[in-house]
Amino acid sequence: MHNEPLRTVDPELHELVLAEERLQAQKIRLIPSENYASAAVIEATGTVLTNKYSEGYPGRRYYEGQQIIDQVEVLARDRAKALFGAEAANVQPYSGSPANLAVYFAFCKPGDTVMGMALPHGGHLTHGWNVSITGAFFKSVQYQVRKEDHRIDYDQVRELAREHRPKLIFAGATAYPRIIDFARFAEIAKEVGAIFAADIAHIAGLVAGGAHPSPVPHADVVTTTTHKTLRGPRGGMILCKKDHRKAINNAVFPGLQGGPHNHTTAAIAVALKEAATPAFKEYAAQIVANAKALAAALIERGYDLVSGGTENHLILIDLTKKNVPGKVAAQALDAAGMVCNYNTVPFDPRKPMDPSGIRLGTPAITSRGMKEPEMVKLAAWMDRIISKPEDAELQAKVAAEIAEHCKAFPAPGIPIR
Ligand code: DSN
């Protein structure tokens, strides 16, 4: 029983995995935080490293038998430091939210003032939004984008920081299509004596591949997930200046977590090795080129893009002028083989569960080898569906066209069956 394959032990679950494989292979996946991990990354996550407990850090563990695990973690840590040019790295956070919580725990006490970008303006829940523990346990001051151009209002960031003197300032976003000026944030943080944390979860692959400026020279701490543009397993990572290494390590373990997920650490090491290759640099540049091409093709078809376009991997469309709610559009697109998510747009008059926009990203389709000509086709497919979101027959027809189209672009990590 213990050595039988999944298909024998649990045919029901095995069939669900195969069905998800088919979905991921046949659809154009446009959620900007998703990707296709390579076969090697997936293989590393499915290894016996999952069997081992290793609370502590390499050379200082609370369990014996760490001869191999220590080497795995050191490899991942060293590769992270080398790839991003960081003085210290912690590869144990279970994902992005725990990584961010560790930063709060390292530098703040409950009730302290913190600053981050408001969620409806593109920030993340853990940057102090009110429904998150980070908004409930800290006094959170939220900055926004400007109404006229949807760019971060750095003057407002500075004014708020001078007024509220936060302990910690977060930069980083989940729905911001523009380059973030990390040097400017660092200047503001320095002026008010705050710790500057850059959350690069969305853009870590772009930073590693040289397609977005790096926060590492400017920030005290940099947090990231490892599974978005970086194309690793689901996990998290914290880079920091060496003066903060102890505080960050203590905050992750024993502060927040128990044993690290060693199979994930191994897969992060693999992803970091892949991210150090010339091919990854090309991929990072192509993500941005694809996003720009898709944005241009959508603008040509009369779509209203937040900030007027993109400089990174994502696009936010405000569908107000098209008279289609974001949720309706996202559901129609999914039925037609294009998976995205509905999303608030800055100053959205509608509710988060029924907002005005949709969010698109190019990392996953770039990993499949799609380039600019495919972005023009994609905009045409999207436009056909959004123009008639109630037409189920059209959705089925486009879904079949897309499934056929996808055959020419095999998805990394998915066996061809
Ligand atoms: N849930 C992620 C995203 O989709 O942007 C952020 O954590």
Image (cartoon, grey):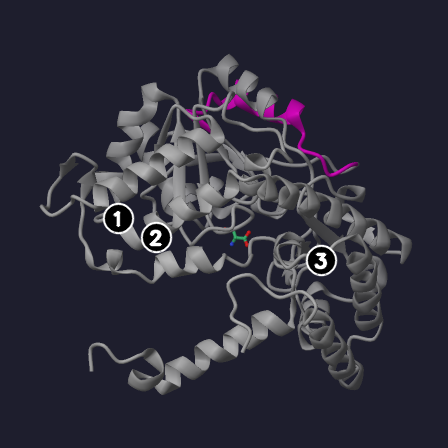
Number of marks in the image?
A: 3
Disc 3 marks a residue whose amino acid type is Met
Q: Mark 2 near ligand 1 (CB under 8 Å)? A: no
Q: Is residue 275 magenta?
A: no
| Quadrant assignment, res 416 | bottom right
Residue under numbered circle 1: 260
| 335 and 23: which is toward the camera | 23
How crowded pointer 2 is (Cα within 10 Å; few <14, some 14-19, many 20+) is rated as many
| 37 and 170: which is toward the camera | 37
Residue under numbered circle 3: 370
| 117 and 31: which is toward the camera | 31
x, y percentage for residue 79?
A: 40, 35
Q: Residue at x 60, y 71 (%)?
A: 25
Disc 2 marks a residue whose amino acid type is Thr
Residue under numbered circle 2: 264
Disc 2 + disc 3, Cβ < 8 Å: no
Which of disc 3 and disc 2 is earlier in sequence? 2
Locate residue 379 relative to residue 161 in the image: left or right.
right
Q: Residue at x 63, y 26 (%)?
A: 181
The stretch in magenta equals 149-169
x, y percentage for residue 223?
A: 44, 37
Task: Name the secondary structure under disc 1.
Answer: loop
